[in-house]
Image (cartoon, rainbow, N blue to C red):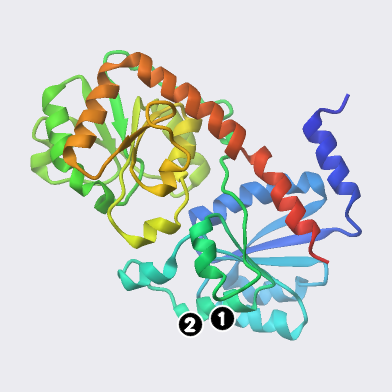
């Protein structure tokens, strides 16, 4: 007997008039590229073939770009990709573009150094630009009116076979990111929590903090891995009790997705989230997470509440897990991708 998922893929496969071969083009293998790769690997069940491509090897790519090939650039802004684009246009081959960050505002802040003129050209000439954020959609539509929104996802298969470490004698809190600027305003809170629960509560971070913050010895430094699949397995295995999701007051955050919520939910970590629309749209305070305002007092109180209330942590992790599973699992996103790709002649 075929299960419902297999039957769905089989039905989709029958709808194809011909096969499509997806070339996912990037030169950095960024996290966005890796997450899209997970989606397109799953789409192979529905009749697609998929090939990740390094744009620096463009001379080897071009001969294979036939009418059955669907190139997709991943937030690219290099001269190499511009040359590839020009070849595609001259050969009457459509391409797609995927972007998940407000690179324009990031450029103004000095945290993105790509060529915005090339970025705009690649987006403008794409058949369609895909974004995972409705706020970002408004920005991109000014450049490409055919831009569309497809919600972000989490692939639970990444966690298959993973085992959580047991650590009943201590509590682990983490901020799994290299964005020190987002955590900076919480340094006094981390200091006070580490002091209050010295020897019992540990913050596991992926960047160094000033020495005074770690005066009470409550901070551990971990290594962040560039491979997203491996990093998620590592994150799950650490079995964090509490996950932090603070945000610096920057306009670029308005166009981001709820990545921390999806990851914490999937890993059964009780999250404390910044009072910001990217989180408050999905997190109900006290139900599937805690919402903290941009004050030290709010974050301190939220941390103490979760540290001392095991039942609340259990409630939050359970509700967040099932919400992420239902709303953001790869299986829930695949139909949207298939509907969109099936609409391309």
Name the residue located 36 percent from the left edge and 47 percent from the top edge. Answer: 276
Q: Nearer the viewer, residue 322 or 91?
A: 322
Instruction: Please say if 156 is above or below 199.
Output: below
Tag 2 secondary structure:
helix
Q: Is residue 32 left or right of residue 48?
A: left
Name the residue located 54 percent from the left edge and 31 percent from the top edge. Answer: 323
What distance separates the C-alpha of mark 2 from that of mark 1? 6 Å
Asked if the residue under mark 1 is in contact with the one under mark 2, i.e. CB atoms within 8 Å, the reply is yes
Residue 318 seen in the current view: yes
Name the residue located 56 percent from the left edge and 78 percent from the top edge. Answer: 80
Mark 1: few/some/many CA within 10 Å (<14, 14-19, 20+): some
Q: Quadrant of the C terminus?
A: bottom right
Residue 157 seen in the current view: no
Mark 2: few/some/many CA within 10 Å (<14, 14-19, 20+): few
Q: Which residue is mark 2?
A: 117
**Coordinates of residue 239 in the picture (x, y in percent):** 40, 25
Q: Is residue 142 left or right of residue 110?
A: right
Q: Which residue is mark 1?
A: 121
**Coordinates of residue 292 in the picture (x, y in percent):** 29, 38
Count of all numbered marks drawn on residues in the image? 2
**Image quadrant in which you'd find residue 197:** top left
**Image quadrant in which you'd find residue 59:** bottom right
**Coordinates of residue 150 in the picture (x, y in percent):** 62, 53
């Amino acid at each position: 007997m075929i299960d419902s998922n297999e039957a769905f893929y089989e039905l989709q496969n029958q709808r194809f008039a011909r096969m499509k071969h997806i070339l996912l083009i990037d030169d950095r293998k960024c996290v966005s590229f890796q997450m899209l790769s997970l989606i397109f690997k799953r789409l192979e069940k529905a009749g697609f073939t998929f090939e990740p491509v390094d744009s620096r090897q463009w001379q080897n790519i071009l001969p294979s770009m036939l009418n059955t090939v669907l190139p997709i650039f991943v937030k690219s802004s290099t001269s190499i990709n511009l040359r590839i684009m020009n070849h595609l246009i001259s050969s009457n081959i459509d391409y797609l573009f995927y972007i998940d960050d407000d690179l324009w505002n990031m450029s103004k802040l000095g945290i993105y150094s790509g060529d915005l003129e090339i970025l705009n050209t690649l987006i403008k000439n794409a058949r369609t630009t895909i974004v995972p954020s409705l706020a970002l959609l408004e920005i991109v539509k000014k450049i490409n009116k055919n831009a569309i929104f497809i919600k972000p996802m989490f692939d639970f298969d990444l966690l298959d076979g993973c085992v959580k470490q047991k650590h009943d004698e201590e509590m682990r809190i983490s901020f799994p990111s290299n964005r020190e600027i987002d955590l900076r305003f919480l340094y006094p809170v981390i200091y006070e929590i580490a002091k209050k629960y010295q020897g019992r509560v540990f913050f596991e971070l992926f960047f160094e903090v000033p020495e005074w913050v770690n005066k009470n010895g409550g901070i551990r430094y971990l290594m962040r891995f560039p491979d997203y699949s491996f990093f998620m397995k590592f994150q799950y295995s650490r079995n964090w009790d509490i996950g932090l999701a603070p945000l610096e007051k920057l306009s670029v955050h308005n166009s981001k997705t709820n990545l921390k919520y999806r990851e914490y939910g999937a890993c059964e970590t009780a999250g404390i989230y910044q009072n910001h629309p990217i989180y408050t749209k999905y997190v109900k305070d006290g139900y599937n997470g805690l919402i903290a305002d941009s004050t030290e007092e709010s974050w301190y109180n939220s941390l103490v509440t979760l540290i001392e209330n095991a039942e609340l942590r259990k409630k939050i992790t359970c509700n967040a897990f099932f919400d992420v599973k239902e709303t953001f699992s790869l299986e829930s996103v695949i139909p949207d991708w298939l509907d969109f790709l099936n609409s391309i002649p």
